[in-house]
């Protein structure tokens, strides 16, 4: 699938340039390694169903929202939030999720 970015900072994180609010993630090698893997999976997928079929990503469509998310790494609190369009995914942001009890 094609990736599109609506945010320069998220694009910089994916490209390992680390600007703005994602600058602090530079030292989190595990997160960056996991993010690279997720991005690779998304790019190789033929459609969103192929992404959803990768169980380790724990794909979910967010309720009452135009966005979906996947887990970034198996034992991490990060999720990649994105917007689905016909044949491309628009990456929106990465957020810390309290979904896993990270209070």
Image (spheres, rainbow, N blue to C red):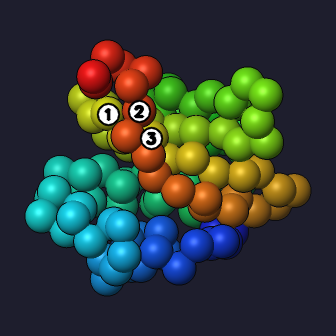
Does dot 3 land on a helix, a strand or a loop? strand
On residue 77, the disc is: 1
Q: CA distance from mark 3 to mark 1?
A: 7 Å
Name the residue located 27 percent from the left edge and 34 percent from the top edge: 76
In the rendered image, residue 71, in percent from the top left (x then y), is placed at: 44, 36
Reading the chain from its start, which is encountered first: label 1 or label 2? 1
Of badges 2 and 3, nearer the viewer stands 2
Q: Which residue in the protein does label 3 denote?
A: 79
Q: Is residue 87 left or right of residue 90?
A: right
Tell me if mark 2 has few (under 14), some (14-19) or many (20+) residues whose alpha carbon lies within 10 angstroms of its own. Answer: some
The percent position of residue 3, horizontal first and vertical second, equals 64, 68
Q: Earlier in the sequence, mark 2 or mark 3?
A: 3
Secondary structure at badge 1 equals: loop
Whether residue 34 appears in this view of the structure is yes
Determine whether, in the image, residue 97 is placed left or right of residue 66. Answer: left
Is the residue under label 2 in contact with that under label 1 (CB below 8 Å)? yes
- Answer above or below: position of 45 versus 10: above
Residue 45 on image: x %, y %: 63, 53
Image-based side of 95 in relation to 48, left or right: left
């Amino acid at each position: 699938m094609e990736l599109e970015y609506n945010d320069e900072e998220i694009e910089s994180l994916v490209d390992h340039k680390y600007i703005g609010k994602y600058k602090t993630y530079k030292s989190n090698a595990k997160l960056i390694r996991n993010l690279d893997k997720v991005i690779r999976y998304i790019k190789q997928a033929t459609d969103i169903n192929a992404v959803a079929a990768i169980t380790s990503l724990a794909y979910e469509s967010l309720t009452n929202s135009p966005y979906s998310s996947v887990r970034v790494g198996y034992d991490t609190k990060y999720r990649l939030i994105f917007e689905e369009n016909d044949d491309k995914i628009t990456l929106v942001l990465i957020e810390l999720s309290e979904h896993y009890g990270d209070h």
